[in-house]
Amino acid sequence: MTIAERVKQKRTDLKLTQAELAKRVGISQQSLQKIEDGRTQNPRKLLNLAKALHCDAEWLLLGTASEVRENISNYSNDNSPSQSLETNLRPIITIPQAAQWPNITELDKGKFDWLETPNSTSKSAFWLNVVGDCMMSPSGISVPEGYLILVEPSLTAKSGDLIIAKITDSKEVTFKKLVIDTGRTYLTPLNPNYRPIEVPNDLTIIGIVTQARILF
C-alpha cells in the first residue's frame, strides 16, 4: 500500500471529502489531490496530515508504526550515570534554548513542560521536538518530524551516534548522525534525500540522543 492509498483510505474511513481534509491540514484541495493520486510522495505538512487523519506520521509515509524501527538506545553510551528517582522528569525545551544549554537558569515547572525519562538519565538531559524530515528514513533508524528526542549532554559522542550539535561560529542547532571518517567529521541526515555536511573537528556537541518517542 502506498502513501496515496493510505491517505485516501483514512480519509474515506473518516467520511471526509478532499476539501474538508485539505482545510484541516492547511493545504489546498489540489495539493491533497496530488498526494492521493501519487504525484506527491513526501508531503511537506506530513505531521498535520497525520493528525487530521488520526494516525501516526511514520505509518502514513512509510507504512510502519513503530516508534523507531531499530532501538535508538543502542546509540547511547553504556556509561550513562545512575541517578535517583528524583531525576526521572526532564524539561521539554526549544531549539534556541538548546543552543544555550546548559546556560539556562531557573528550570522551574511553570516555564517548561516536563516528561518522564529513564531513572538513569542525568540532571543535565532534556527533551527536544524534532522539526523537519531530514532524520526520517525509509529503512533502518527513522526519527520523524513531531517526535520528541531525549538529549543526554553527559555522554561522550562517538562516530555513529545521533547527536544535537551547534556548528562553530553559528547559533544554528542541528539533529544529525555523527560520522567520523579518515579524520573528517560529518553531520549526516538519515533521510537519503539530504546530503552529509562536513564540519570542523571542534564541532560543539550539545548532547547524544538516547531515546525518541511521540506523544498522542
Image (tube, rainbow, N blue to C red):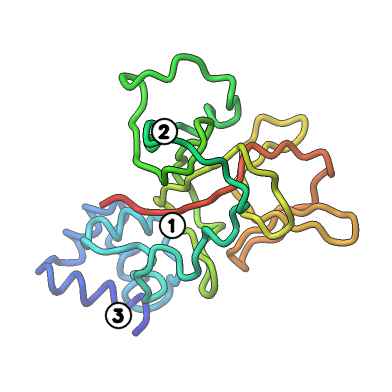
Residue at figure coordinates x 58%, y 64% from the top left: 191
Q: Nearer the viewer, residue 155 or 186?
A: 155
Q: Bin the neighbour count of mark 2 within 10 Å (Cα to Cα): few under 14, some 14-19, many 20 and up.
A: some
Which residue reaches farthest top?
Answer: 106
In the rendered image, residue 63, in percent from the top left (x then y), is placed at 37, 76
Q: Nearer the viewer, mark 1 or mark 2?
A: 2
Q: Residues within 10 Å of mark 1 (few under 14, many from 20)?
A: few
**In the image, farthest residue toward the right:** 183
- Tag 1 residue: 44
Position in image of residue 152 (x %, y %): 56, 41
Give the CA separation, mark 2 to mark 3. Answer: 44 Å
Q: Nearer the viewer, residue 137 or 24?
A: 137
Quadrant that contains the N terminus: bottom left
Q: Distance between the Cα atoms at labels 3 and 1?
A: 17 Å
The three-letter amino acid code for the residue at tag 1 is Arg
Q: Position of residue 145 (x, y in %)?
A: 44, 53
Residue sitting at x 50%, y 69%: 70
The picture places residue 77, in percent across and down from the top left corner, at 62, 52
Residue to which mark 3 is pinned: 5
Check residue 160 in the rendering and tell me which mark sits there, or answer none: none
Kind of residue sitting beneath label 3: Glu
**Residue kind at label 2, given as amino acid type:** Thr
Q: Quadrant of residue 4?
A: bottom left
- Is 163 placed left or right of 211 in the picture? right
For disc 2, the marked residue is 87
Task: Count neighbours of disc 3 (C-alpha within 10 A) and say few if under 14, some if 14 to 19, many if 20 or more.
Answer: some
Name the N-terminal-most of marks 1 and 2: 1
Q: Are marks 2 and 3 in contact (CB under 8 Å)?
A: no
Cα separation between marks 1 and 2: 37 Å
Q: Nearer the viewer, mark 2 or mark 3?
A: 2
Q: Say which element carries label 2.
A: helix
